[in-house]
Image (cartoon, rainbow, N blue to C red):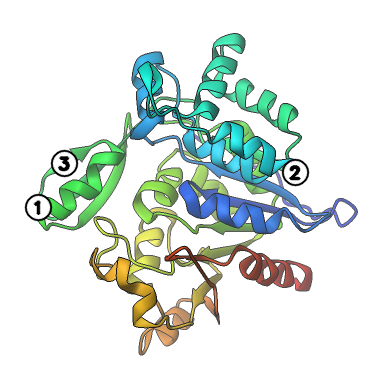
Amino acid sequence: MEYEYPSYTRNSEEGPRIVVIGGGTGLSVLLRGLKKNSGLHISAIVTVADDGGGSGMLRKDLGMLPPGDVRNCILALADEEDIMEQLLQYRFGNGRLKGQNMGNLFIAALTDIYGDFELAVEKLHDILRIKGKVVPVTSEDVTLCARLKNGKIIRGESKIPKAVSKMESPIEEVFLEPSCVQPLNSAVEAIMNADMIVLGPGSLYSSIIPNLLVGGISDAIRSAGGMKVIVCNVMTQAGETDDYTVVDYVDAIEKYLGSGVAEYILINDHICQPEELNAYICRGTRQMCAGSGEREILAQRGITVIESNLIDISDGMVRHDAHRIANILLTMIHGA
């Protein structure tokens, strides 16, 4: 399908417009950092390929799109996050609802009331008075599939990392079934009107790339006038990016986005102490920092490397520091 993309215009009176594309915990963490900055117009484009946990149960039982990633992003942008998070992140511990999330059920109820997942998400925006907009990348029911290096095809987002680890065969490529999936118009419009488009952070093959597989999204990013930024993960991920270098990470995105599109990449340069990584070492994961020669390789591709301490360590978990990343992105966007 051919798309007619609107021309990009920056509206300085409205303030900068930033689009973040991904899913999972990484995206919601970044949104919490960005929302602290007044005058910033935020749109989050979120994958709907999740088929695990409570989202997968609702998807199977009710035939609706998985609400988990959308819920987390909406909560991250909510005005009264502390109060609403306790309610909408509550997980039932007993009975027939054991393991199910209250927020997922809330979205399921809204979807049933209004008969449309996109409209249900819009109504939740109003209820929580969120600072920004969360947009499912598509309204179509999709299954994420992976072809492994050994030729095996794995269907289902939650099954892919397990199969990779069990077979010890990395991902060759990922694709959607059905293959001809159309994006929501609001997702394309947000990309085309953005001053900055950010890919990540988040799981590479299950949160970021699935958005690029939806028809028209990669085309929109390539055609958009806003600056394009990749936020590299701070750790490799078992079953997805085992042994990946930073260049491997970029290669994977460019395979679906196209080369010569990304203009900047944010990379963590803080080396953690061994004791801070004990939980990760046991899982076979490690830090992702720019290795010898990688900066030159990326520079030759026209990608500006921005390195800084992007790590926040709490409760034994190594995560992106949302506020540091947000400050870097805002400095970039205001200096453009």
Left or right: where 129 falls relative to 317: right
Q: CA distance from mark 1 to mark 2?
A: 43 Å
- The residue lying at 22 percent from left, 54 percent from top is 171
Categorize mark 3 by other alpha carbons within 10 Å: few (<14), some (14-19), many (20+): some
Rendering quarter of residue 210: top left
Q: Which residue is mark 2?
A: 131
x and y, in percent, of residue 117 in the image? 55, 21
Categorize mark 1 by other alpha carbons within 10 Å: few (<14), some (14-19), many (20+): few
Categorize mark 2 by other alpha carbons within 10 Å: few (<14), some (14-19), many (20+): many
Q: Earlier in the sequence, mark 3 or mark 2?
A: 2
Rendering quarter of residue 336: bottom right
Q: Earlier in the sequence, mark 1 or mark 2?
A: 2
- The residue lying at 70 percent from left, 69 percent from top is 327
Mark drawn on residue 153: 3
Q: CA distance from mark 3 to mark 2?
A: 40 Å
Left or right: where 97 falls relative to 151: right
Please tell me whether residue 80 is drawn above or below residue 318 in the rendered image.
above
Q: CA distance from mark 3 to mark 1?
A: 12 Å
Q: Which residue is mark 1?
A: 167
